[in-house]
Image (cartoon, helix red, strand yellow):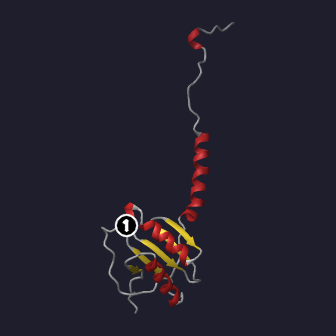
Amino acid sequence: MQYVRSRHAKSRAKAEINVVPYIDVMLVLLVIFIATAPVVMQGVTVDLPEAEAETMNQDEQTPIIATVDKVGQYYVTIDTQHVKMGSLDELTQFVKNELTKENSKSRPVVVQGDAKVAYDNVIQLMNALKRGGVKSVGLVTEPMSENR
C-alpha cells in the first residue's frame, strides 16, 4: 500500500521566532548592569557635621558642591559629575569656568567638608572659592540628631 501525499499535506516552513537567545542576552545585560551600577553611582563620601540650618530653596538651580574629604583631597560635584581636583588653584579655575557659562551664572556654590577634616582645609577651600569670584558660599551639614 502506497501513501500518496497531496499538495496540502506537505509540511510548510514555520515562521516562528526563537526567543531563547534573546532571553540569554537580556540576562547577561541584566547581570552587567547590576555589577556596574555601584561603580557608576560613585560620589565623594564624607561624614558631614551636624548642625541646625535652613534648607535650600527648591526653586534654585542645583548647587555646585566643593568638597574636602577626611584626608584633605578636593572634589567638585556639578549635577552628577564628580571631579577630583589636584589643587585649590585647579578647583578655583574649574568653578570659575562653570560660573561663566550662561545657564550657571546664578548657580549657588556650597562647601561640603568632612567632620574629621582639619578646619583649616575648609577655610582654605572657602577662600579659594572667594578668590575665584564666588560671591557667597554656603555650608552643607547634616540635620541634628535627636540624641544631642
Q: Is residue 65 above or below residue 122?
A: above
Q: x and y percent of residue 63 in the render? A: 40, 70
Q: Is residue 141 above or below residue 38?
A: below
Q: Nearer the viewer, residue 94 or 18?
A: 94
Q: x and y percent of residue 112 in the render? A: 46, 79
Q: x and y percent of residue 40 in the render? A: 55, 62
Residue at 46%, 82% (x, y): give it. Answer: 126
Direction from residue 119 to residue 22 in the image, left or right = right
* Residue 78 visible somewhere in the drawing: no
Q: Secondary structure at mark 1?
A: loop
Q: Nearer the viewer, residue 26 or 51?
A: 51
Label 1 Cα crowd, 10 Å radius (few <14 / some 14-19 / many 20+): few
* Quarter residue 10 falls in: top right
Residue at 58%, 44% (x, y): give it. Answer: 23
Residue at 61%, 50% (x, y): give it. Answer: 28
Amino acid, disc 1: Lys
Direction from residue 117 to residue 102 in the image, left or right = left
Direction from residue 32 to residue 53 in the image, left or right = left
Q: Which quarter of the rendering shows the N terminus?
A: top right
Q: Which quarter of the rendering shows the C terminus?
A: bottom left
* Residue 99 visible somewhere in the drawing: yes
Q: Is residue 17 above or below residue 7?
A: below
Direction from residue 13 to residue 103 in the image, left or right = left
Outermost residue to the right = 1
User: Residue at label 1?
Assistant: 105
* Quarter residue 16 falls in: top right
